[in-house]
Amino acid sequence: MSEFMTDAIAFLPVLGRGLVTTILLTLCALAVSLALGLVWALMGLSQHAPLRWTNKIVVNTVRGIPIIVQLFCVYFVLPEWGIDLDPFVAGAVGLGIAYSVYQAENLRGGFESVDKQLVEAGTALGMSRAQVTRRVVMPLGLRTALPSFGNTTVMLLKDSSIASTITVAELTRSGQLLAISTFKNGTVYVLIALLYLAASIPLAMAVRALEKKAAWR
Amino acid sequence: MIELKNIAKSFGTRQVLRDVSFSIAAGEVACLIGPSGSGKSTILRTINGLERHDAGTITVDGTLLTDAALPAIRRKVSMVFQRFNLFPHRTVIENIIEGPVQVLGEDAESARLRAMELLKRVDLADRADAYPGQLSGGQQQRIGIARALAMGPQAILFDEPTSALDPERVGEVLAVMRELTQDGMTMVVVTHEISFAREVADRALFIDEGVILEDGPAREVLTAPSAERTRLFLDRVLSPL
């Protein structure tokens, strides 16, 4: 046990740097996924049929391809077309695209749960469709989407480990390199697991706090 | 002020309005009564375009109701809903200034001042910063009326404004509406409150199965109806046992 502790103390600085990268990667991918997800969700609720079809095609396509394959596409295939991304950026973009469809479904579910009578109230006041969406549907729908949004974010944190396959030096990759060079597989992977837990529990708590704050009664 | 000519409307294969025509003069208070499912709410909702009519024409203050004219018409005609439909994420005062600020482009400060005046008028000035969920049904509906008034409308459509209220809360809402009639507001009210209608309405229209069966002075229609169907309905509403 004391050997575990000495090793742990020696490994933590390296793994800590990996954890920081993991968190940054998660936050960047989260931003990309939310921005794109909002676009997909609004397309899905549009009154124009071509936009709704586009939404369906995008969601079903992206959801049907393994995340690791999507990351390979961004990192290995895009350079063939002259788009050469740094591993971290490729990871954030790839994970962001992969997760945008889940965010879109979270948001769409939230938006669709908004009482149609409130939409009518806004419409009767003379608000345009865009105003009703911005002033009524989005603020109310986002609150409803918060719990599923929290789940998705924790999943994204864990799936950011897939970026290790495109050489992003995040937590999993740092750990792998450490394990290979020290042969201390047990210590390293237990530490990685604990560090992921340590990052995801506060995240879940933050989302729950946000939910409480968003309740208006 | 409001004129409907030969309005027809179907939901799928079910025809809810057939050839409805009537007009309401400025300052007039008209009550639409009739059994549930008769089409009276649908009539009301065609006037501000929440429902699109299939045939016929609607004119509001000289403007023909078309898709292009809807924004202008909705500024002239406000609506009060059966289930209040206040925005739950906004406070009372935010609910009232939402239309003036977002739709009429009024600046927030002057909208607030006017909103406080309206709140005094519905006797809820002390609840300006409450959320709708913290208010009783009767209070919420009075806010609903204040929100409608904030748009400075020429007419207000009331869709069963007291039907979702506890019986002891009905009076406070009717009192506010009674005051409006005294101010000369044009009102179209879908209601089951026959005695209120008899007291304050100029006109009563009895609607059944999408047709206006009777249209005349409220006192006459509601006290001595000429159609047998109206008489049966009133008997049932006034003495349910």
Image (cartoon, coloured by chain):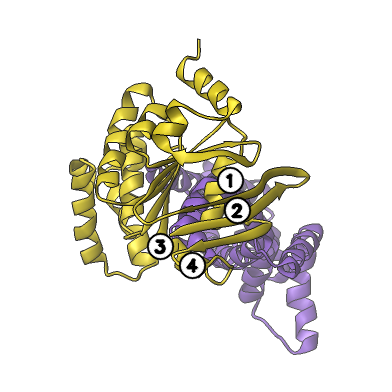
Q: Chain of mark 1?
A: B
Disc on the earlier residue, 3 or 1: 1
Q: Chain of mark 3?
A: B
Foreground disc of the pair 4, 3: 3
Disc on the earlier residue, 2 or 4: 2
Q: Which mark is residue B42?
A: 1
Q: For mark 2, give the secondary structure.
A: loop
Callouts 3 and 1 close, C-beta under 8 Å? no
What's the amino acid at mark 2? Answer: Glu
The residue lying toward the viewer, choosing from A11 and A82, is A82
Q: Classify the position of the N terminus of chain B by image quarter.
A: bottom left
Which one of the lettered chains is coloured yellow?
Answer: B
Q: Residue at x 64, y 80 (%)?
A: A86
What's the amino acid at mark 1? Answer: Thr
Question: Cα distance, mark 3 to mark 1?
Answer: 19 Å
What's the amino acid at mark 4? Answer: Pro
Disc on the earlier residue, 2 or 3: 2
Disc on the earlier residue, 4 or 3: 4
Question: Cα distance, mark 4 to mark 3?
Answer: 9 Å
Disc on the earlier residue, 1 or 2: 1
Question: Cα distance, mark 1 to mark 2?
Answer: 7 Å
Q: For mark 1, give the secondary structure.
A: helix
Q: Which mark is residue B76?
A: 3
Residue with the mark numbered 4: B71
The residue lying toward the viewer, choosing from A66 and B119, is B119
What's the amino acid at mark 3? Answer: Lys
Residues beneath discs 2 and 4 located on the same chain: yes
